[in-house]
Image (spheres, grey):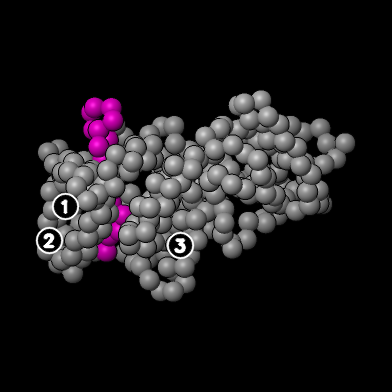
Amino acid sequence: MFRTIVALRALMICTLCFVFPQSVLGEKEGAKSGLIVEIDGDVIIRRESGPHQAYPSFVLRAGDTIVVDKASRCSGFTPGGMAFALRESEKMIMTTSSKGGLGRWFGGQLLDFTGETSIRTLLTRSSRGWNVDVRALLQLFPAHQGSVRPGEPEFFWRLYPGIDRYRVTVIGSDGTQFERVTNGCRIMIEDLQPGTEYDWRVEPALDCWTAQSRWSHFRVMTREEESALDSVLVDLPELEAAVLLFISGLCGEAVDRLDFMIESGRGGPSVFMWRAKALAAAELYAEANVDLMRFYRNQ
């Protein structure tokens, strides 16, 4: 139990900020990094500084050697952006070769994911119920410093008890401003320009409401960015695809895929760990805690 509590606290901190130690990223800024996505069993990462126990979301660098024990397996992305899958007793040295991999685009996404400025959005196209009755009004999606797909992104927030109507305000870096009033906890807003940054907030549509809601900042992906992402997702295994969506900021889509994998009985314990990270990023800590405990029970 103590191990689970400590791990949960560490998970929440790392998930909300997506910050990894500089020693993990490498000494040079912009160094290429890889990522452990799934582990089942005992996997060791051999590095000059010594051996490290591998775990989902472990950041790899060139020169690392992955050693998979008997009856174990491991998958992820190399520093060159190539997907890999290792089974019992196999080894692999990490290189930056990008032949047949995701290349520079993936490298940029991963560096953002492991960097200090990457608090990511949860773009929600999920069937999951986000209508949570709480004692405070909280904007959920897009999250602060997040991003959304171009088109007509949906905005979500938690309901305040006793209030049905809400006012959503969106201000663009280009000077545009939108204001919408709606019932419930979600609204779709069109006319957002690809590549443009925006700030948004939600508050009860009441003249007597005096509390100030915080502003959240987000960016709309360009069509080219969306196309590059979708073209890569086609050939990836299910879990790797979900993780790529997650580190690209489209966490709601990642949760959709992880939900489906869990409901259909596919994937190992690592699926619960990744879903816990996505839920924690939305400040849905209770659900994240449940997934984290499932992860450790199935280790």
Looking at the image, which is closer to me, 124 or 60? 124
Going from the N terminus, do you reach mark 1 or mark 3 first? 1
Q: Residue at x 22, y 60 (%)?
A: 85
Q: Residues within 10 Å of mark 2 (few under 14, many from 20)?
A: some
The quarter of the picture where the C terminus appears is bottom left
Q: Is residue 130 visible?
A: yes
Magenta stretch, residue numbers = 25-40
Q: Which quarter of the image is occupied by the N terminus?
A: bottom left
Instruction: Locate residue 163, reporting x and y percent.
Output: 81, 49
Identify the residue shown where x is 62% and y is 39%: 192
The three-letter code of the residue at mark 2 reads Glu
Cα distance in 3D space between marks 2 and 3 = 28 Å
Q: Quadrant of residue 214?
A: top right
Q: Secondary structure at mark 1?
A: strand
Determine the residue located farthest toward the right in the rendered image. 207
What residue did someone put label 3 on?
Answer: 257
Q: Is residue 144 above or below residue 135?
A: above
Q: Which residue is mark 1?
A: 66
Q: Tell me how far mark 1 sits from mark 2, CA to CA.
A: 8 Å
- Residue 157 inside the magenta-drawn segment: no
In primary-sequence order, the first of circles 2 and 3 is: 2
Instruction: Tell me which residue sits at (52%, 54%) in the image.
Output: 252
Q: In x, y percent, where is residue 224?
A: 44, 42
Which of the labelled discs sits on residue 90, or is there none?
A: 2
Q: Nearer the viewer, mark 2 or mark 3?
A: 3
Residue 184 on image: x %, y %: 75, 53
